[in-house]
Amino acid sequence: MGKRSLQEAQTVDLDAACREHAAGLRAITRKVRDDEADLAQDACLKLVETARREPVAAPAHLLFRIARNLVIDRMRSRGRAARLFQEATAYEQQPSSAPDPERTLLANERLRRALSVIDGMPDRRREAFLLHRIDGLSYPQIARRMGVTVKAVEKHISAAMLQLARGMRTDDGDD
């Protein structure tokens, strides 16, 4: 009986907090037109639900925080809906970000040529180049992995870059 009367007293306190801070709730929920009353009611209900699970030391503070979070959620939801359902003309006015087929074909051909040049490199040069450019390793890391000096790594990568540039330039002139 004591526990039940304590819960009833807390419910009365929560009800009083909702009524007492109605103006503050309206000020917070006013940002979401047409849903102010619903959000204020939802905030009060969530406050009561929270109080059922755990004691609430500062009901007014929690009530305002819940209301702010509900307003933020509703505004985000409306923003997503607006972006999702915007008119088709808005899409038609935007240039396509997808590359045209000719550019895609040229890029694929260029990539194929670059890979061919890389495949034609001596093994150690190719290994150093790929460890640096693909795996993102630093020169000292590559030197440790390959068992060579940093200076040797510098020479391998420099030679690889030069071979790649020459190979690409030679192929560009063949078209």
Image (tube, grey):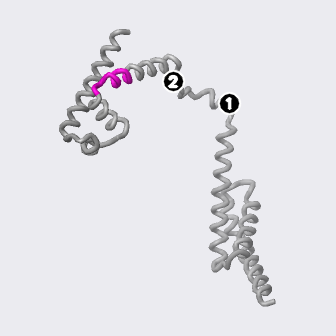
Query: Which dot marks residue 173?
Result: none
Query: Which dot marks residue 88?
Result: 1
Instruction: Check if residue 83 falls in the magenta segment.
Output: no
**Residue at (67% x, 60% y) in the render:** 70
- Name the spot of residue 83 as percent of width and height, x first: 64, 40
**For the residues bearing labels 1 and 2, Cβ distance under 8 angstroms:** no
Closer to the N terminus: mark 1 or mark 2? Answer: 1
* Residue bounds of the magenta highlight: 114-122
Q: Residue furthest bottom?
A: 2
Q: Secondary structure at mark 2?
A: loop
On the image, numbered disc 2 is attached to which residue?
A: 99
Is 71 rendered above or below residue 151? below
Q: Secondary structure at mark 1?
A: helix
**Residue at (47% x, 19% y) in the render:** 103
Is 85 rendered above or below residue 71? above
**Residue at (63% x, 78% y) in the render:** 58
Q: Residues within 10 Å of mark 1 (few under 14, many from 20)?
A: few
- Residue type for callout 1: Ala
